[in-house]
Amino acid sequence: MNGMNHDISIRIDGHSVPARPGESVLDVARRAGAHVPTLCHDPRLEPAAVCRSCLVEIEGQARLQPACSFQASPGLVVRTDSPRVRKHRQVLASLYMADHRLADGLPQRSPAGSSLRGFAKAAGPLIQLHPVHSPRAGRPGDHNPYIGFDPGLCILCARCTRYCDQVHGAGAIALAERGRATTVSTNGGAGLLHSSCELCGGCVDTCPTGAMFDKKPSHHLPGQLRRVRTTCGFCGVGCQLDLNVKGGRVIKVTAPAPGQTINDGNLCVKGRFAYDFIHHQDRLTQPMLRDGDGRLRPSTWPRALERVATGLKRVQERWGSGALGFVSSSRCTSEENYLLQKLARAVFGTNNCHQCAAT
Amino acid sequence: MERKNATREQVLLLLEQAGELSPALVRQVERQTGVPEAEIWGTARFYSLLSERSAALLLCRGLTCKLAGSRQLAAHLEQRGEPYRSVSCLGQCDRAPVALDQDLLVRHGRARGAVSPDDPDLPINLAGQDDASFAALHRARQLGPSAVLDTIEASGLQGRGGAGFPAHAKWRAVRAQASPLRHVVCNADEGEPGTFKDREIALRRPYRLIEGLAIAAWTVGAGTIHIFVRGEFPRVRAGLEQAIAAVGEALSGLDFRFVAGHGAYICGEETALIQAMEGRRGTPRIKPPFPTQVGLHGQPTLVHNVETLACLPSILLRGGEWFRAQGRTEPGSKLYCVTGHVHRPGVYELPLGVTLDDLVDQAGGYVGSPRAFCPGGASSGFLPMSMRDRPLDFQGLARIGSMLGSAGVVVMNDTVNMAQAALQQSIFFEDESCGQCAPCRIGTQVLRQALARFLAEGSPGALNGLDSVSWEMEQASLCGLGMVASRPYTSARRYFPGDFQPASSPEVS
Amino acid sequence: MLGAGAMTNSVTEIRDTDLLFVIGSNTTEAHPVIAMEMKRAVRRGARLIVADPRAIWLTRIADMHMQLAPGTDVWLLNAMARVIITEGLVDSAFIQAHTSRFDAVVQAVAEYTLDRAEQVTGVPAADIRRAARSYATTSKAGIYYTLGVTEHSHGTDNVYALANLVLMTGHLGRRGAGLNPLRGQNNVQGANDAGASPVFFPGYQRVDDPEPRSRFERAWGVDLPAEPGLNLNAMFRALARRDIKGLFVMGEDPAMSEANASAVERALRACEFLVVQDIFPSLTSRHAHVVLPAACFAEKDGVFTNTDRRVQLVRKAVEPPGQARADWEILCDLARAAGYPMPHYSGPAQIYAEMAALAPRFAGISHGRIQREGGLQWPCPSPDHPGTPTLHVGGPINGRAEFKVVHYRPSAELPDGDYPLVLSTGRTLFHYNAGSQTRRDPGTVAKQPESFVQVHPDDAGPMGLTDGQRVRVISRRGAVDARLVLSRQVLPGCTWMPLHFAEASANKLTNDAGDTVTGTAEYKVCAVRIEPTPPT
């Protein structure tokens, strides 16, 4: 509302709710605490109104209307929980289940991936319909190591394709075919490595069913999955991301929900997928000292620190503080940079201290 | 994301001209237009004429062709070793059963259907001599836009594409928009099974249509006139192009552009049609906003059916009141197509609101003992013969859960099993659902499968849940196709419950 | 010149900006998520003007692409300034209220006529004029630049020329309007903030200014040197001269990432005492006397400050491998081993508190606050200050901003008969810096397995070089092998290589001529020739 003087009010389930003209009924309803389920909605995308899960009753409208695209206007009367709306949700969920056969065992592949199951559960007892077999084509020959597509779980909400176009601008995937055969496709069904896909994985995070999934092996590790919110360690944008940790390893990276952080739920290929280095076998795991024959050999921390301290002191004593240089790192934390310059200045008496990326 | 100044509207044309669809072709079109390749691929694959090009004949599997023996035609083709592909209705129902060759010309089919005899007092008068005097256009210019609008309003002209929306209201809505760039679009994407009247207008009275377009464009202040012709009607387009070229000077100042359809029934829906014109997948848009506000390229657009436009010249020349008086229960005359079990299938221009029996009288009477009819193509569902005295008009039929639609009347006699007929229509809707919204995409499949299973197994249990599914399709689909796609089933079940008992009667021929 | 080496605006403002002037920034590859905001702005109807020697991805959706010859930025920008001045598009009220020395710039740019600008830069005069008019007449106009502006021997001049445009149009201190360097590294801003600089203590307080120095001396309990130290470029020159004998390198691989890397590596090899603290073995660690294993970002707590001055938390998710330890722990122990009584910090939160107490710009920031409120943008002088999304609201933070006269100076090394092509280097989307992280992941490697050099077909043709061929790229300083990619992204006469591939390290070729102010090397322009790789 922001105290704007154009505020209007609409009625939602009998309560008067303030709104801005042109705001979607969905946004107003959710602010008012009404439960309006959505599947194809993503605040970053233009409304598509294709999943039909958010249909509500609007007085004066003969048909149910999509809350995601219907705009608030003064005096609008909305019902989000009428018998008609409830019946609609029940039958719609039954239709989805007939096409997608999402049993309770659906793997929870992405944070949004359980939306369809949640929708179906909330919709009440489902009507048992014979399953249909939509001939949606997948991309069995797609060998990219990051992003998978399981057409059996797809509900054609087009969040992935709209994300790819509207947010990332890559336009690597689009809806193809028609009717029951409609699917998500690249040009000619080529693998993503051979498309304009930049492997950002936004399609995975926005998918409400898990049809778009993270292909990286998640190692069946013991323990509870923990999500640790942190800041991406690559470029300077400062994207917030969630390290998914299990059994002491980072097994996946996911984006926080849209609207919460600077990156608005977006990540790039590096932030989302390039985390194998964390547990890579090439990591340095022990201090090493160069010995008399010029080879680096493993050592202990006390010996290594002693060697560093005396080595630097020796240079300082023999050649002066100006003969020392300290290269700090724009990859390390601010606290570590603070300590390094403190080390250079306070301990070794030199301002020859600069971070690696002085630009 | 498309390139700056991308020429998306070129996509379908370039694909059409290039031949066989391939990823390499798509990349080439991406370079030419600046539209991402996946979107080009996905768009091409939406349209059957672009995605499936082969030398095979196209064999119509519409209801009328089934009634007329498309199965025998198929057997005949197989015998002769002519490869064929079964496709949705080809809009040649008067010539049923029909097969087209790869140039989309009729290879197998009967003679073209009849039309009403020449009568200068008929507003459209298909059998009359077409004239290119443009007297009505001159008259409109004399009257001025405001008087033209009043005349149209007085005529009571309703959109003849199916919805029956008052024409003058659309015109006024377009005129009320601030944008100086406006469009008039002629919807000649006639595709409703049982309907072929627009085809006949364009072939027989092209100047009626062209003059109607000119009047509409001049009145609403549109600079460009787009004629969207069904892809399966190459002769219609050629005829109109010739007609426009032939009069040259008389139409100077008007910018006529042709856009070809590429094989998708849904593009008859006005927003899907606009999508197709912009080079996109023909998926209907959310309304509002309506095309009169946000249409082609985001600009105000008046979309009218061919027949609606063809009514305009006589309205202008003979007055709104005169046109209104041509109707029986609603204003004006109406072109009714009639096919199926009648003796002389064809297009008959009759007062709006005649009964089935009046219409079939014109068409030479019933073949056999009539049992059921569709008043307006597949979308209208089925009505029993007890409704034979009902006026065939927009509002009356809507009140009983049917519709006049495009007035493609299909008559079925007592040899027809209505569960089988419902399945036939369900196949059509399943094939032609755009797939965008779930109720329609999944619902059409559920319906078709259940009907097929019922007919195969004879167990009514196969139909469990269909009432709810039909309700949901009608309530929750995004566009009109999904809303009506369950009607063949619900109406057949309602009016012909016997055909949904166990141990059903034999299949339709 | 504006009083803060940082973005004046927030990343979240980009979507509401009406004109984006992107210069020397391949944003979609170097800052992909910021590029998403730019794309969103363009979808909304914002105009996008790109100035770049290469036809980068953003040019596909741009209104204009000014494809200038590498290193001619000052010509382009001064010519734009001249258009804005001569056409009376300046914001006189802003100039009068908030700036000084405008007259000097008016005089200086007078000679930068459009015709001559076209000759030097290769950008049509009409485009320069159109860009200048668009920029000057759009209120919410933001400039975005990256290393394509700064990594020149005249990088500071380029920035000054941009700032002159900002000041003369008054496009500052409003949502969407400002001057925005997009910082390349996750914490390049934070490292500067924290005083990893030869000139500044934490919080941009000069080491040669007695007031802050005495404050730091009191806090740290020692006397501190008053003379500014050597910048990185100068440090490696000193190392090569043997003036520096002992070098401590944390989280950096200068043998790979410094310009003229071969010379750097020679100097490192000769270094009397070299310590490397890192997460992976590197070209540099090969020469170290001591190698200390460090924790990566997922294994420690702390903060990173991003490109829009936003201080955000880094949280420990997993344990470091083996005996590896967080850099901050190592540094504390090292200080104590060297005899300094470094406090026994309970963790990074306490270290940050010590820094914030000494640096007024960050005084209101603490781990606790970020934990509760999310990222905080400095300046944030007190615990109840909400942070500063947009800088210079109501005028430059340092009071009056001074216009700077800049004149064109050619790049330090220009092509000649022996080395006829210009080489620029840069980043790609799929890899990061030295590649130590991204070249250990299957997808990024699959997308981009090896180094390459982009060459214009007009240049490759006469040399008999074909697409996909292995070639040797040779400069005065070294030679590397790479795959040749025929590309019209580059101008004729220009080539481009990524910097991520150790086995084809582009920095063996680049010129270490440093900017006169920052010492930043000229990664964007050096002279090379290209030959087929000889058969082995």
Image (cartoon, coloured by chain):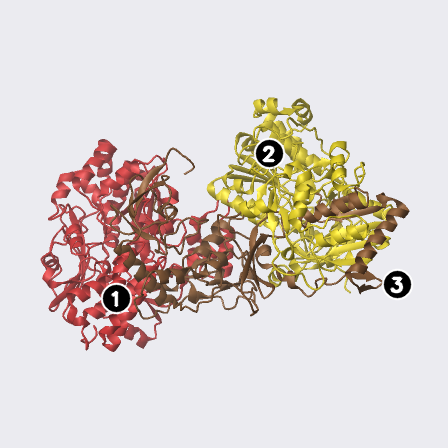
Residue C514 lies, in percent from the top left, at 76, 41
Marks 2 and 3, how far apart at CA: 63 Å
Near mark 3 (Cα within 10 A), the count class, few <14, some 14-19 or many ≥20, is few
Asked if residue B12 lies left or right of residue C183, the reply is: left
Residue C68 lies, in percent from the top left, at 64, 40
Residue B313 lies, in percent from the top left, at 21, 41
- The part of the image, by quadrant, that contains residue C453 is bottom right
SS of the residue at dot 3? loop
Near mark 2 (Cα within 10 A), the count class, few <14, some 14-19 or many ≥20, is many
What residue appears at the point 61 percent right and 25 percent down from the top-left corner? C98
SS of the residue at dot 2? helix
Find disc 3 in the rendering and name its residue.
Answer: A292
Q: Nearer the viewer, residue C77 or B204?
A: C77
Does mark 1 fall on the same chain as mark 2? no
Chain designation of label 1: B
Find disc 2 in the rendering and name its residue.
Answer: C128
- Whether residues under marks 1 and 3 lie with C-beta atoms below 8 angstroms apart, the answer is no
Find disc 1 in the rendering and name its residue.
Answer: B466
Marks 2 and 1, how far apart at CA: 66 Å
Quadrant holding the C terminus of chain A: top right
Residue sitting farthest toward the right: A318
The amino acid beneath tag 2 is Ile
- The part of the image, by quadrant, that contains residue B453 is bottom left
Which chain: brown?
A
Q: Colour of chain C?
A: yellow
Q: Colour of chain B?
A: red
Residue A136 against residue A272 in the figure, above or below: below
